[in-house]
Image: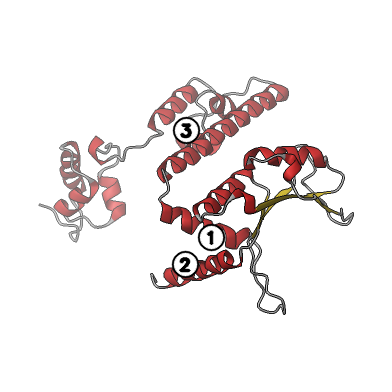
């Protein structure tokens, strides 16, 4: 059998051997090792025109889209039009059909622009579907939280969004006071408090919101997720607007933040702080 270090004088004989092995279903690596041809350029020449066996091709979820895009391109379709039909990106289409002849353009700039817009909308729609699928799959992976998982989640949540005692302050601030603008976060925090045995009678609620907003509407909004009457809310904190800042939270959906305060909570705060540092030490010990 010919060897790669020979003069390759009988190149055609070596090519015939390579083609025969290829048609028998051998991969490039197997042919290379069988014929001792370790020069990629020479191996490419030996196998020129010979397709790879099916078993060596990696499965690709976009194979059907690729085949459809190539068929449409052969029919004379442009990138913009192909993008609308199968719903794939222009960058992918470009890779899939770049070896095919370019069709002759037969539309006005306005028509081309309209097709491009439809293609972009289709791309955005596909991307949004992918986002939602990813979020849904991740949500399903969580399942029901154990008591310990709820405990750790609550501690981390409080340390991110709750009030803390300041070492530099002459007055202790050991109390549970939590603020957030997300009703889901508030609900999770309340669930955490309930797991600690904190009765609703010890919880105080207050809305904190910028001026020039509907305070009554905000209080009614927050009363529902916490399950209390608006009349039980403490006086709303109104934040003055600074004209030098460019506030984004001015839409109708803006409801400010809800402050949750727990009375007689110094001991609970100390436990919360201690648990947080326990999480930090536990994370450090895993490295």
Helix, strand or loop at disc 2?
helix
Task: Give the colour scheme shown.
Answer: secondary structure
Instruction: State the residue in front, 277 or 177.
Output: 177
Q: Name the residue beneath numbered marker 1.
A: 156
In the figure, is residue 85 to the left or right of 11?
right
Question: What percent of the width, then of the height, locates residue 256?
Answer: 75, 47
In the figure, is residue 71 to the left or right of 85?
left
In the figure, is residue 91 to the left or right of 44?
right
Disc on res. 279: 2
Q: Earlier in the sequence, mark 2 or mark 3?
A: 3
Q: Please determine whether, in this image, residue 125 is positioned above or below residue 248.
A: above
Residue at 41% across / 34% down in the picture? 62
Residue 254 seen from this side = no
Residue at 63% across / 50% down in the picture? 201
Task: Please identify the residue farthest to the front as the structure is shown.
Answer: 201
Pair 3/1: label in front: 1
Question: What percent of the width, then of the height, locates residue 169?
Answer: 71, 77
Question: What percent of the width, then of the height, locates residue 170?
Answer: 72, 79
Residue at 42% across / 56% down in the picture? 148
Q: Quadrant of residue 253?
A: top right
Q: Quadrant of residue 202?
A: bottom right
Q: CA distance from mark 3 to mark 1?
A: 51 Å
Q: Name the residue beneath numbered marker 3.
A: 97
Instruction: State the residue in front, 11 or 107.
Output: 107
Q: Earlier in the sequence, mark 1 or mark 2?
A: 1
Q: Residues within 10 Å of mark 1 (few under 14, many from 20)?
A: some
Question: What percent of the width, then of the height, locates residue 112?
Answer: 67, 25
């Amino acid at each position: 059998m010919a060897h790669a270090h020979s003069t390759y004088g009988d190149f055609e004989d070596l090519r015939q051997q390579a083609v025969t092995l290829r048609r028998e279903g051998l991969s490039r690596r197997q042919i290379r090792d069988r014929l001792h041809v370790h020069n990629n350029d020479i191996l490419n020449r030996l196998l020129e025109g010979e397709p790879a066996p099916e078993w060596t091709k990696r499965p690709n979820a976009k194979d059907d889209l690729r085949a459809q895009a190539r068929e449409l391109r052969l029919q004379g379709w442009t990138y913009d039009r192909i993008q609308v039909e199968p719903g794939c990106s222009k960058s992918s289409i470009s890779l899939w059909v770049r070896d095919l002849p370019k069709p002759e353009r037969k539309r006005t700039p306005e028509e081309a622009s309209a097709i491009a817009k439809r293609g972009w909308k289709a791309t955005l729609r596909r991307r949004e579907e992918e986002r939602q699928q990813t979020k849904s799959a991740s949500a399903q992976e969580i399942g029901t939280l154990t008591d310990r998982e709820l405990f750790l989640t609550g501690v981390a949540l409080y340390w991110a969004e709750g009030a803390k005692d300041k070492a530099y302050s002459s007055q202790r601030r050991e109390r549970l006071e939590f603020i957030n603008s997300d009703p889901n976060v508030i609900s999770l925090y309340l669930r955490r408090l309930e797991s600690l045995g904190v009765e609703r009678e010890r919880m105080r609620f207050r809305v904190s919101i910028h001026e020039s907003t509907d305070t009554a509407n905000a209080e009614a909004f927050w009363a529902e997720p916490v399950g209390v009457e608006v009349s039980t809310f403490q006086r709303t904190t109104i934040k003055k607007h600074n004209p030098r800042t460019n506030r984004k939270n001015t839409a109708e959906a803006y409801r400010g933040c809800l402050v949750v305060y727990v009375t007689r909570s110094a001991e609970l705060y100390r436990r919360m702080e201690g648990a947080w540092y326990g999480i930090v030490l536990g994370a450090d010990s895993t490295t």
